[in-house]
Amino acid sequence: MLKRYFGPNIHQRLHFFVLALFIVGVVCSKFLMSMGLLLGVLNLILEANFSAYWQRLKDNKLILFILGFYVLHLLGFLWTSNVDYGLDDLRKKTSLLLIPIIVGSHPILGPKRWQRLIRYFLLTLVITAVINLIAFHFFPEKLHLIDIRDMSLFGSHIRYGILIGIGLAFCLERIYTQRKHRNAYVLAAVFFLVYTFYSQVLSGIISVAIVLMILLTFLLYIKRLYWVLILSYVSVLGSVIGLFYNLSFPVNYPVPCSERYDEMETAWNKRSILNYDSLDQRKQPVRSTLERYLSSKALCANASGVNQLSKEDIRFIERGYADVHETYGGIQARLLDIRYQIHHASNPSGHSILERIEYWKNAWAIIENHWIIGVGTGDVDDAMQEMYDVRHSPLTAERRLRAHNSYLTYYLTFGILGFLFFVFFQLKFIVQQFKWQQSVGFIFGIIALVTFLFEDTLESQMGITLFAFFYAVFSRKIPTK
């Protein structure tokens, strides 16, 4: 119908516009992602070339796998009791069904249009990252940005860190394969590396490390520099061992003199708007944050120590920084936080690493009782909350969340066969990318495989769209010429 008024290529142009909405929206806007879904489905209906759609989908085994994964959620209703929760979960995962159909039903994009999409994606990443940095440095109080991880204004800092990793992969691939705009890609790649280092997001750091290791492996393997490749992996292994060795030491600073808490309280209340007996902006006791901060600066826990603090130090303590080294930013600050969690935190609540360990223990306890077919699509949250009570978990009520591990989530939801299918279609995707020599698709598959270990990526709209879009796009060989 639209061809009569807008020409024979209208549906191809609309399809490209939908893909642009997806690739920009996944970075910064749920609205754009929703608009992409709506327009994508409408475009397919109005074009009405259903036999061609079916043939393209049928010929794409990777698309069929992900559609089969959605069907598994439908089958999970057969042994679930909380139907309302299951329907809400199914609604969230609509993108897991529609995006592969929208992307897979149309012909593969030509090289020029694919390059344009990549440029839109990278430009959106650069703009949003710059906005994040400006907001965190110049307007933290206005925007209530307390923690460095609050710097991600356009969605989850974890998902954003993964997107930065994918953006870096695109940049490095362009630098290696193209001469046009090479300097721009180099600048963007350096910026993404700096941003990842500064943001302290572990998923982002891991994603960037995966990108660098895989591309280094490809380059050295192609050039047959096998000894350099072996030395590179030995160096990485040594660095990992050194990292774990560093984390094995508790965070202890010498106390230079005897504590006088009454003096410290009086001096603090004179200098800060936050009362000594209240909570800081991270909901930690001010007294504990203050004492740790003083100790990290080798200052006494008394009036003299408090009076030696600068106005900036006072602001940092009010925002919840318990160690002066945390204020420096970068990976060092994140590692310091992890070391403190491991060795000093008595309760996992409020400590992301320890919380995840508790989530995993709780999920595994459910799996031990339901390992054959799981608890079904709708009973995941109920089972988790019930098991927290059974195990007398030390987590506070508001911190008793889902598993934060996609493998455990789908194991306890669908049992052993569902878990194996989830792993299988990811590995199949990675193997296919290797055969097609699609380096960014291969990297995306590895990043997904690894980050699923510590995230429920497919439980949020941005996470589902991110996975479904890139999986669907790379489910076919993209022409390069």
Image: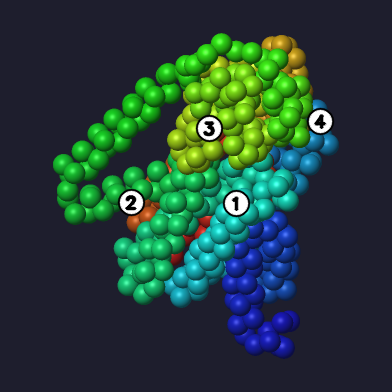
Alpha carbon distance from label 3 to label 1: 17 Å
Labelled disc at residue 215: 2
Query: SS for tag 1?
Result: helix
Question: In the rendered structure, which amino acid carries the disc numbered 1?
Answer: His
Please name the residue that numbered disc 1 is placed on: 137
Mark closer to the observer (4, 3)? 3
Residue at horizontal 64%, vertical 17%?
A: 347
Q: Position of residue 478 (x, y in %)?
A: 44, 65
- To which residue does mark 4 refer? 82
Q: Residue 241's image quarter?
A: top left
Name which of mark 3 and mark 1 comes first in the sequence.
1
Is residue 453 visible to us here? no
Is residue 230 rendered to the left or right of residue 466? left
Q: CA distance from mark 4 to mark 1?
A: 45 Å
| Residue 117 image position (x, y, % from top left) | 52, 68
Q: Could one spot residue 257 in this view of the protein?
A: yes
N-terminal of the pair, mark 2 or mark 3, is 2
In the visual, does 361 lie left or right of 84?
left
Q: Quadrant of the C terminus?
A: bottom left
